[in-house]
């Protein structure tokens, strides 16, 4: 059985810190954002395990962290 890891980015800060690049995406349904340099993805500790069509998924929640 195949397994995959997905990262769920939870945005808890104002969106003015990121740039929306969706207009550059090849697929119109996709959202693309650009974070500033040195942005870290900090795990929240929430991990979900699920399966769909015989594939196991591990979903890890993270929040962007902007060091000062």
Image (cartoon, rainbow, N blue to C red):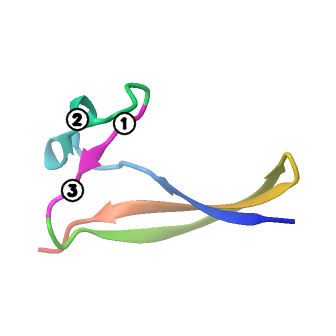
Asked whether residue 61 is drawn in magenta, I would say no
Q: CA distance from mark 2 to mark 1?
A: 10 Å
Query: Looking at this rendering, what residue extends furthest in the front direction?
Result: 26
**Which residues are the magenta region?**
30-36
Quarter of the image that includes the C terminus? bottom left
- For the residue pair 1 and 48, the one nearer the viewer reads as 1
Question: Mark 3 sits on what residue?
Answer: 35
Residue 22 placed where, x, y %? 27, 33
Q: Which residue is mark 1?
A: 31
Mark 2 lies on residue = 24
> What residue occupies the far left of the structure in this picture?
68
Task: Say whether residue 60 is left or right of residue 20.
Answer: right
The reply, left or right, for residue 54 in relation to residue 29 is right
Question: Principal SS element in the magenta part?
Answer: loop
Distance between the alpha carbons at the discs numbered 3 and 1: 13 Å
Which residue does the image show at 23% across and 68% down from the upper left?
Answer: 39
Q: Residue 13: give x, y in percent of width and height.
A: 27, 49
């Amino acid at each position: 059985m195949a397994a995959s890891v997905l990262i769920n980015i939870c945005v808890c800060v104002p969106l003015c810190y990121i740039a929306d690049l969706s207009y550059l995406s090849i697929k119109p349904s996709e959202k693309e954002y650009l974070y500033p340099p040195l942005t870290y993805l900090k795990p929240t500790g929430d991990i979900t395990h699920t399966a769909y069509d015989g594939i196991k998924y591990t979903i890890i929640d993270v929040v962007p962290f902007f060091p000062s």
